[in-house]
Image (cartoon, helix red, strand yellow):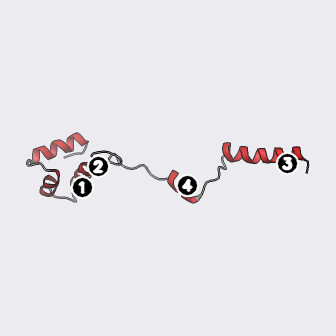
């Protein structure tokens, strides 16, 4: 095999690797790319508050527990926070 033929073969391999559909990825890299996006609370500074509101909206937390953890003393304030977060009360 000549040097020119070998260079062309290597160029095609590298070009198809970086520009083609057969981009070489490990199973772990592909799993990260295929991951479903998380909800709105991921990465938010209000993560804890939004998580509590989500649990309350799903019915997995009572209103008393939600109000105690959020530090509010009225059910109206809790429902206002849910409306502000875009959750149905």
| Secondary element type, mark 1 | helix
- 39 lies left or right of 62: right
Could you tell me how far apart the alpha carbons at marks 2 and 4 are, in whole angstroms? Answer: 27 Å
Q: Position of residue 75 (x, y in %)?
A: 10, 48
Q: Earlier in the sequence, mark 3 or mark 4?
A: 3
Residue toward you, 58 or 15: 15
Q: Which residue is mark 1?
A: 55
Question: Total label count?
Answer: 4
| Secondary element type, mark 2 | helix
- 83 lies left or right of 77: right
- 75 lies left or right of 87: left
Q: Which residue is mark 2?
A: 47
Q: Residue at left 88%, top 43%?
A: 4
46 in relation to 64, above or below:
above
Q: Position of residue 5 (x, y in %)?
A: 87, 46
Within-10-Å neighbours for mark 3: few <14, some 14–19, many 20+ = few
Q: Earlier in the sequence, mark 1 or mark 3?
A: 3
Q: Earlier in the sequence, mark 3 or mark 2?
A: 3
Could you tell me how far apart the alpha carbons at marks 1 and 4 are, in whole angstroms? Answer: 32 Å
The single residue placed furthest to the right in the displayed view is: 2
Q: Which residue is mark 4?
A: 29
Within-10-Å neighbours for mark 2: few <14, some 14–19, many 20+ = few
């Amino acid at each position: 095999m000549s040097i020119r033929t070998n260079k062309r073969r290597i160029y095609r391999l590298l070009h198809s690797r970086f520009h083609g559909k057969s981009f070489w990825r490990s199973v772990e890299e592909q799993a990260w790319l295929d991951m479903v996006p998380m909800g709105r609370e991921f990465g938010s500074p209000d993560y804890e508050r939004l998580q509590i509101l989500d649990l309350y909206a799903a019915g997995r937390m009572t209103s008393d527990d939600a109000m105690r953890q959020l530090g509010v003393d009225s059910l109206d304030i809790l429902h206002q926070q849910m409306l502000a977060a875009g959750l149905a009360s």
